[in-house]
Amino acid sequence: MQNKLIGYVMILAVLLFGGLGTVQAAGAAKASNPEAAKVEKMIAVADKARKRAASVEGEWRDVGKMLKKAKAALAKGDYKTAKKLAAKAKSQGEMGYKQAVAQKDLKMPSYLKY
Amino acid sequence: MTISTKLLGMASAGVLLAGQLALAPVASAAGPSMTEEGKKLAFSRKKGNCLACHAIAGGQAAGNIAPPLGAMQSRFKNKAELKAQIMDATVKNPESSMPPFGRHKILSGAEIDKVVEFVWSL
Amino acid sequence: MKHLLKKIAMLAVAGGIAASAQASPEADLEAFQKFFKKRFASVATEEYVNGVYAIDPIGRENWEAIEEFPPYEPFIDDGQAMWEKPFANGKTYKDCFADGPAIAGIYPLWDKKNGMVITLALALNKCREANGEKPLKYKKGPINDILSYLAYESRGLKTNVIIPKDDPRALEAYEKGKKFYYTRRGQLNFSCANCHLQNAGMNIRADTLSPALGHTTHFPVYRSKWGTVGTLHRRFTGCNKQVRAKPFKAQGEQYRNLEYFLTYMSNGLELNGPGARK
């Protein structure tokens, strides 16, 4: 029962802060908002990871979409969502790069008999 | 899924868990509910989608690319070994076509633990 | 350490591991076709033009029923009209392709002058642009009409991709396509070969994985899932997306090289496009 209560309070808190965030982002002082600047930087870093993966033909399907959504969330002042998406995009960019680089040299499968 | 149904689900899971704890106070965290959640993840096309390749009792339209999942406790020494296989099957066999669910974060760590519980129970 | 590595490398070469990665296209072709002969001993090589239906008798029955009233037929008719209709400047496709319309057999081909693989779709658009027409989109739409018509007229010709020996860049393009084919991609970590070689004939859920051999003979293809005819590069796009990799540009270098390799692997098989698939 107590858990449930905590859950409600948390949801309320998220809604409240989300609302505040929107107000903040809508304000002209967006550039001076350190949280927004931080998220923007995260998105830029993630986009760099995406491009790095693409440069070795290793980009994954949803990274671009995640970044788009992250930007939209940032614009709405939803920093929590934006951060989460940017972090995921960065991680997927890095994994895609790693995957491609690990296969730099073609290794033919053993089931093909020459 | 709306927030309210999600909450309802969480709340009822909590009640369920509480009930089980009351009945069997020594049960570990890896109780039947975890196995049940693991099953959902394993069967879901968007999550584990184990059925794409493995036949599993109770699963419909399973593939046959990989061995049926059964008698797992005789095939793996322990849960840790099974988990390692789900995390990245290419460690043992570089030519395995099984997706590396952990290495590529196809499932989260918590989700993999649930899937391990379920598969271990088969 | 260096000495040891050298030794290992030498051993690898002796063992044929490194050798197959750099095998000649001829040796690749032999190994590829041999693989399928071994896996499906009762299936004749020329049967592979029928794709998954060469190895799936139940699916085949449905497919044969569909082929009695081919869903791609209207596309062939529309394509014929396109082929015959003059461009704004009065010329037609025939002015670009004197041997037309049965020309699918020579594509994809190596273009020495431009140092690139030219596919039939690309050649069609080059013709349009040379005559002041807008290029067609490469995945959906009218390009499939004209491709359907040309494929239909080319039925019975044999796949005969040539990798000219007088231009090392041709072999390089082939090697790039081959590398693409065996490289794992996307979050799910599948290569083309994982599904269509290693696990060809197995079921993924309720679907049988089609064999790679013969994959290129029947394009463009009417897919029930699409409800229309689509190009080979549209299909490549779909495959890449399924493994959660970002697809490449249709008719971009990656897919053209992939088509070059993959079509070469079906050398000797009859062209039977357009096809119908699930």
Image (cartoon, coloured by chain):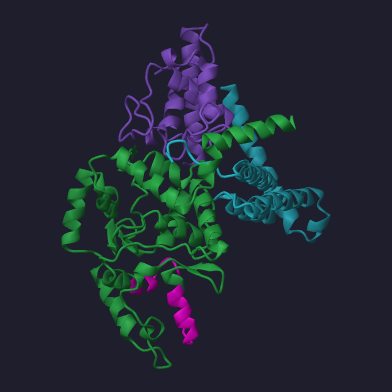
Where residue C116 sits: x, y (%)? 54, 67
Where residue B74 sits: x, y (%)? 42, 12
Left or right: where C98 falls relative to C6:
left
Left or right: where C246 falls relative to C207:
right
Residue B61 versus residue C56 in the image, above or below: above
Chain B rendering hue? purple
Where residue C43 sits: x, y (%)? 24, 44
Chain A rendering hue? cyan
Q: Residue at x 33, y 55 (%)?
A: C225
Choose top left, top right, bottom left or bottom right for residue C275. bottom left
Chain C rendering hue? green
Q: Is residue C255 magenta?
A: no
Viewer can see residue A33: yes
Left or right: where C239 falls relative to C83:
right
Residue A2 versus residue B43 in the image, above or below: above
Location of the N terminus of chain C by quadrant is top right
**Which residues fall within the magenta stretch?**
C123-146
Left or right: where C37 falls relative to C108:
left
In this rendered view, identify the residue nearer to me: C7 or C157.
C7
Residue C229 versus residue B43 in the image, above or below: below
In this rendered view, identify the residue nearer to me: C97 or B57.
C97
Where residue C140 sits: x, y (%)? 40, 67
Viewer can see residue C206: no
The single residue placed furthest to the right in the displayed view is A32
Q: Is residue C126 magenta?
A: yes
In this rendered view, identify the residue nearer to me: A11 or C73.
C73
Residue B67 versus residue C39 in the image, above or below: above
Q: Total of numbered circles in the picture?
A: 0
Q: Residue at x 53, y 45 (%)?
A: C21
